[in-house]
Image (spheres, rainbow, N blue to C red):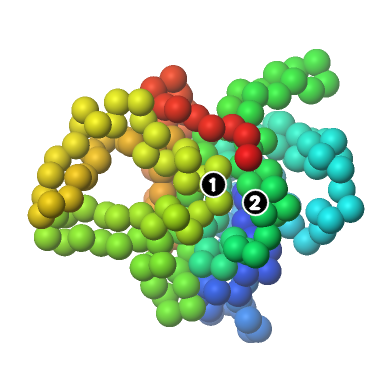
Amino acid sequence: MGKAIFVSYKYSDSKVFQLRSVSGTTTARDYVDKLAGLLEQEDYLYKGEDDGESMATLKDSTIASKLGDKIFRSSVTIVLISKGMKDVTVADTDQWMPWEISYSLKEQSREGGNSKTNAVLAVVLPDENASYSYYITQNPLCNSITYNTNMLFDILRLNMFNHKKKEENIRHCNGQKIYQGSPSYIPSVKWENFENNIDYYINLAVLTRQNINEYEVIKSI
C-alpha cells in the first residue's frame, strides 16, 4: 500500500469549475471524489473527510482529538485551494482548514506511536471560469509565476516562501525579484497539472519534507 494521504478542503465551495461528471452544481467536494479515485489508481490510501460539522460548540480539546485521529496515520496532506475556501468574515481559528493544516504540520504522539510533520502540497482548483488567476498569475516576460498568497489562511501563507536562505537564490527581471529552486515548504500546483502527474507532485512534497530543516515551518494557527 502506498502513502496515506489526508485531504483538506472547503466542502461547500462552489466557486470551482463545473466537472462534466457532475449533474448539479460542482463543489470542492466533487473534486475530492475525483481525487480519491485518482489516488486509488496510483495505490495511495485516501484519508480525507468532509468539513460539514460546525465548530461552534466544540472545545479546543475536542477539535484536537478529532483531527489527531484523522491525520495521525497520514504522511502527506493535500490542501485543495479554491476561490471561496476562506470565509473572510470568520476568524481562521473558527474554520476547519487551518486546524487541519496545523495538525498536519505538527508532530504527534498517539497510541504509543509518533508521527512526523506531514509533507504538504497545495493543489489549486480552477474557478467558475476555468481560471487560476485568483491565485496564480503567469509572467511570460520573466518566465515566472506570482502567487496571491494574501488570499490564503495565514498558516498556508506563512509556510510559503519560507526557505531560510531563499534570498540567496533569486534572479531579477523587469524590476521583480524572482525566487528560484524550492522556496516554499508548501509548494503549489494547478489541478490540471497535478491530475496528469500525481506521483511527481506528491514526491516533490515528500522531498521538501525530507529537507524540512531548511524551512521556517509555522505549525500553529
Image-quadrant location for residue 24: bottom right
Quadrant for residue 150, please give it. Answer: bottom left
Residue 114 placement: quadrant: top right
Mark 1: few, some, or many residues within 10 Å (few <14, many ≥20)?
some
Marking on residue 154: 1
Question: Which dot marks residue 92?
Answer: 2
Residue 215 percent coordinates (x, y): 42, 27
The residue type indicated by label 1 comes to Asp
Q: In this view, does 63 lie to the left or right of 189?
A: right
- SS for callout 2: helix
Q: Is 47 drawn above or below residue 111 in the view shown?
A: below
Q: Which quadrant, please, contains the C terminus?
A: top right
Q: Is residue 132 above or below residue 92?
A: below
Residue 92 visible, this orientation:
yes
- Front residue of this view, candidates 33 and 175: 175
| Dot 2 amino acid type | Asp
* Name of the residue lying farthest toward the top: 112
Q: Do the residues labelled 1 and 2 touch (CB within 8 Å)?
A: yes
Q: Residue at position x 53%, y 78% from top?
A: 18
Which secondary structure lies at badge 1?
Answer: helix
